[in-house]
Amino acid sequence: MKNKTTKFGYLELIEEEVILPSGDIHETKYIKHPGAVAIIALKDDKLVCINQYRYPLKENLIEIPAGKIKFQEDIIEGAKRELIEETGYTFDSARIIHKMYPAPGFCDELIYFVFAKNVYEYNGNETFIQDIDEQIEVKLLSLEQLELLFNDGKLNDLKTSFAYLYLLKESCDKQTNWNNVFPIFDDWKTI
């Protein structure tokens, strides 16, 4: 079996020969990633988002704040650091609500989703500096604004789409009549 690792900054390209459950030998390639954190932060009942140019896509995306986890960094502390760096906001308490692999076909990245309510402007003494490629405009978006963006196909970032659907679910969980959320249509056909 041959194995090769090529480093690109904090990423590694792994090339391996593996034996599949069928017994066949297959060459596979994937990216090894240190992991990331994405923050679902609410300020005045609005989702803290950023509008950021993404060079590989050649367009701006509306995203929730996120970034890679530093080596042996606590997830919540990493979330706080990224939120301050990208938006200037911070929080006193937060919790991990979910984790997911965004692209398991070629990358082992695991994103932790952290939920923080009542975020406020950071005014501490420690300086946080944005990465050079982070040209960011902070936006506070209501659930209604997120819905419009989502329905218009303008909420294309996976993390942010998940945040919107999570907030929508939380909003729906508070309602007692599910027919108001998912009305029953008379024209549905039974198979």
Image: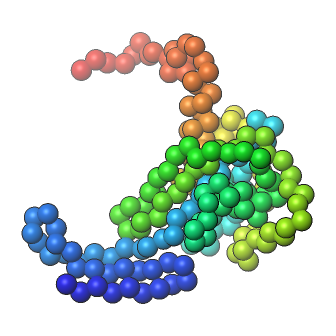
Splitting the image into 4 quarters, where does residue 135 fall? bottom right
Q: Is residue 121 left or right of residue 161?
A: right
Residue most extreme to the left: 23
Could you say where residue 17 lies in the image, as x and y percent from the top left?
22, 79
State the residue in front, 166 or 139.
Answer: 166
Which quadrant of the figure contains the C terminus?
Answer: top left
Splitting the image into 4 quarters, where does residue 177 fall? top right
Q: Is residue 152 left or right of residue 137?
A: left
Coloring scheme of the render? rainbow
Which quadrant of the figure contains the N terminus?
Answer: bottom left
Could you say where residue 84 lies in the image, as x and y percent from the top left?
77, 60
Task: State the residue at coordinates (55%, 83%).
Answer: 9
Task: State the residue at coordinates (68%, 67%).
Answer: 53
The number of callouts visible is 0
Could you say where residue 184 lies in the image, as x and y percent from the top left?
45, 15
Work out whether 49 lies above or below 52.
above
Can the viewer see residue 16?
Answer: yes
Splitting the image into 4 quarters, where does residue 83 fall? bottom right
Q: Is residue 184 left or right of residue 167?
A: left
Could you say where residue 16 lies in the image, as x and y percent from the top left?
28, 80
Work out whether 17 lies above or below 87.
below
State the residue in front, 190 or 121.
Answer: 121
Can the viewer see residue 156?
Answer: no
Work out whether 87 lies above or below 91.
below
Task: State the residue at coordinates (80%, 69%).
Answer: 128
